Structure formats: structure tokens, C-alpha cells
């Protein structure tokens, strides 16, 4: 259904979001469920819209240019009228290209392909007629997606930082173990007084290691509390945005 596959749970959430934004407009929902990306930053071409439009004119595939135009229109609300015209123009060009292809396959008796091309023509007609509605819903959808992608990136960065801290802790513990084993081997060569001093040194280092262990445990608890706080804040902000969308 979606152009970019994601986990089932995430997909379900975004389907629910799109349904919420489209309301009772089943046709609009059906159309946008085929045209919007869960992650527009990775799903939509990084090429300039002018380049994609030029490539579409040569290949007859206007999809990437349409995707780019819809996304850019959501990020540039001050230029909405211009993008409406751009999208409508792309849709009309796509219709013309598809109609020519449809004529060829019909002459060859390829009825299934002709039917598929006919549906594509209807989709582009819908896009041309409902461009403003498409942009309105796409704007809310993509803006929510970008916020949540930012939150996800933050969670991933914090996860990596925790992993780095855990690796540092493991290396510290391992180094302490190696040092203890080395000192134990050295004791066999020591005199009584040297052994007594080595044991005192071991006890001092054990106390220091224990204090570090307690400090690390407290740091972990603090990180967990902060992660929980951020999670609750993000949840509250999502709920606020949801209420604002419903209010509009």
C-alpha cells in the first residue's frame, strides 16, 4: 500500500493519521495512501524539481516529479498557489503520456495493461481536480511525520550514547580485572612488607572501583529517568498536535 515499507505498527499509526486527516473523504484517502511516503526524507528524490520534470518529459514517468512537488508544496506554504499550478501541469502531462501508451497497448490487445493505464489516468485527473485538498492533507501528514522522525532520531542518538557509555564501563571493568590479576602474579615475588603494601593498595582500588560502580549505577538511573521524561513530553506534544488537527 505504501511506497516505503515500515514496521507494521508504524504503518498502522500512519494509516490512522491519514484516515484522521481525510475524514470521510474515501477517494482522497485512497489516493494519498498511494502517493505519500512514511519517510519523505529518504523516499523522495533529492534532485531539483526542475531536473525531475525534465527527466519525466523524456521518460514519460512523472511520478518522482509529482512526489517532489507535493512534498515541496507542504514545506513552502507561502508558495502554495505556484505549486498547485505545477502539480496540475505535471498531472496533465502525465495524462497525455499515459493516454499515448494506452492507445498502443489497446492496439496490441493487452487489455489488462490498458485497464491499469486507465486507472493511472483517472488518478492523475483526480490529482488535477483536487490538488488543493491533496496539499492541505499532505502538509499536515508530512509535518507530523517530520516531527516524529526528529523524535526518532533523538531516541537513536541517545541509544548510541548509552551504548558508548556501557562499552566504556565494560572496558574499565576489564582493565581493572587485568590489573588485579597482574598484581596477584607479582605478589609471589614480593617480600612480606611489599605484599602488605600491595594488599593495602588493592583495598584502596577496590573502594574506588566500588564508588565508581555506584556512580555509574546512579548515572544509569538518571538516564532512564530522563528518557522517561522525554518520552512523556513527546507523548503529550503528540496528543496536543492531534487535538489541534481535530480542532481545525
Image (spheres, grey):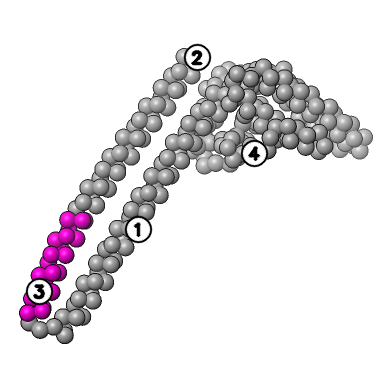
Residue stretch in magenta = 193-213
Residue shown at 60% from the left, 23% from the top: 76
Q: Are marks 1 and 2 in contact (CB under 8 Å)?
A: no
User: Is residue 155 left or right of 57 when viewed as pictured?
Assistant: left
The answer to which image quadrant residue 3 occupies is: top right
Could you classify mark 4 by the number of other residues whose Cα lies within 10 Å: few (under 14), some (14-19), or many (20 or more)? few
Ranked by sequence position, the earlier of labels 3 and 4 is: 4
Q: Position of residue 206 (x, y in %)?
A: 16, 64
- Pointer 2: what residue? 248
Could you classify mark 1 by the number of other residues whose Cα lies within 10 Å: few (under 14), some (14-19), or many (20 or more)? few
Q: Main secondary structure of the magenta part?
A: helix
User: Is residue 16 left or right of 3 when viewed as pictured?
Assistant: left
The answer to which image quadrant residue 86 occupies is: top right
How much space separates mark 1 and mark 4, taking CA atoms? 36 Å
Residue 132, compared with residue 187, is above or below; it is: above
Disc number for residue 46: 4
Could you classify mark 3 by the number of other residues whose Cα lies within 10 Å: few (under 14), some (14-19), or many (20 or more)? few
Amino acid at each position: 500500500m505504501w511506497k516505503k515499507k515500515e514496521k507494521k505498527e508504524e504503518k498502522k499509526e500512519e494509516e490512522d493519521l491519514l484516515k484522521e486527516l481525510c475524514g470521510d473523504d474515501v477517494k482522497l484517502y485512497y489516493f494519498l495512501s498511494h502517493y505519500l511516503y512514511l519517510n519523505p526524507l529518504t523516499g523522495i528524490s533529492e534532485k531539483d524539481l526542475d531536473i525531475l520534470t525534465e527527466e519525466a518529459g523524456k521518460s514519460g514517468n512523472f511520478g518522482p516529479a509529482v512526489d517532489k512537488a507535493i512534498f515541496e508544496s507542504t514545506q513552502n506554504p507561502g508558495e502554495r498557489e505556484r505549486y498547485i499550478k505545477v502539480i496540475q501541469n505535471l498531472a496533465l502531462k502525465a495524462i497525455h503520456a499515459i493516454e499515448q501508451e494506452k492507445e498502443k497497448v489497446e492496439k496490441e490487445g493487452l487489455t489488462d495493461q490498458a485497464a491499469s493505464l486507465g486507472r493511472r489516468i483517472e488518478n492523475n485527473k483526480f490529482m488535477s481536480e483536487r490538488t488543493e485538498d491533496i496539499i492541505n492533507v499532505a502538509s499536515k501528514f508530512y509535518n507530523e511525520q517530520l516531527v516524529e522522525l526528529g523524535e526518532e532520531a533523538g531516541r537513536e542518538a541517545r541509544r548510541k550514547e548509552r551504548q558508548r557509555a556501557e562499552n566504556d564501563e565494560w572496558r574499565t571493568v576489564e582493565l581493572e580485572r587485568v590489573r588485579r590479576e597482574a598484581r596477584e602474579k607479582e605478589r609471589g615475588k614480593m617480600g612480606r612488607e611489599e605484599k602488605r603494601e600491595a594488599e593495602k593498595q588493592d583495598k584502596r582500588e577496590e573502594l574506588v572501583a566500588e564508588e565508581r560502580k555506584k556512580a555509574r549505577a546512579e548515572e544509569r538511573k538518571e538516564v532512564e529517568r530522563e528518557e522517561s521524561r522525554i518520552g512523556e513530553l513527546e507523548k503529550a506534544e503528540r496528543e496536543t498536535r492531534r487535538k489541534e488537527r481535530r480542532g481545525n
